Amino acid sequence: MAGALLHPPKAVSLEEVVQVALERGYTAQGEMFSASDVAKLAEEVFPCQAELLSGGLEGQNRERILQHLLAGLPLLIPYDEDSNHEPCLRRGYKAHWAVVSGALLGLKGDSRLPACQEDAEMPGLFHATPPCAPLPPGAVTETYLLSKQGKSCRYQLWDYRRVQESNAQLTDFSPRRAADGKVYVVPAGGVREGLCGRAVLLHPLPAWEPLEA
């Protein structure tokens, strides 16, 4: 889903992505417990550069993520998935990946983002047009992420804090999975090392141009 948002020159099927992941030893059952492996896989199957964030989704990483989304670019965030696909806190037992493709920002009444166009039908709703200037300090009062999990039929708006909290507590491998008799690829250091506080930003590569003869 994230790769399609980069508008690759040719479609890449899910089967192709899984096959490469299997061949590289990143997965055994389709699981991906390493953000580093997800970044490497993305760079191999799509024309993109993957930027791996660590240390959580707050502070400078928060600003980096919002600027990335305002530029119209997708990112991947691991989190614990609840029954309705929204973030929850299960210590990593329900760890999944979500594609985030946009943000809904609540701004102070006197704040405006540069290069924004007011919606023709909804006064007070503004659409950002990439590229966007940095967000004014203190202007944002609420943040929601436009997110989708692979099993969901639609995008959802998730409160940024809930996503951050879910991402920050991915520490343990599910005992149920550990006892199901299947083999899983888990990085050294476990789920905590592979997923906790991590995210992957995807950047499209510059348009390829053939060399002149």
Image (cartoon, rainbow, N blue to C red):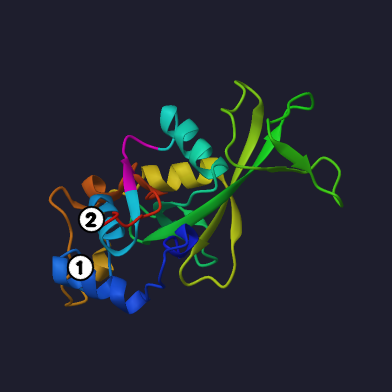
For the point 64% across and 30% down, which residue is it? 140
Dot 1 and dot 2 residues touching (CB under 8 Å): no
Number of the label disc, if any, that sits on residue 178: 1
* Residue 143: image location, x then y, percent: 61, 39
Kindly identify the amino acid type of the residue bearing the numbered disc 2. Answer: Asp
Measure how far apart labels 1 and 2 are at the Cα level.
21 Å
- For the N terminus, the quadrant is bottom left
Disc 1 or disc 2, which is closer to the eye? Answer: 2
Label 1 environment density (alpha carbons within 10 Å; few <14, some 14–19, many ≥20): few
Q: Nearer the viewer, residue 29 or 178?
A: 29
Q: What element carries label 2?
A: helix
Number of the label disc, if any, that sits on residue 31: none
List the residue tagged with mark 2: 37
* Residue 197: image location, x then y, percent: 34, 41
Number of marks drawn: 2
Tell me: 116 left or right of 31.
right
- For the C terminus, the quadrant is bottom left
For the point 38% across and 61% down, which residue is it? 96
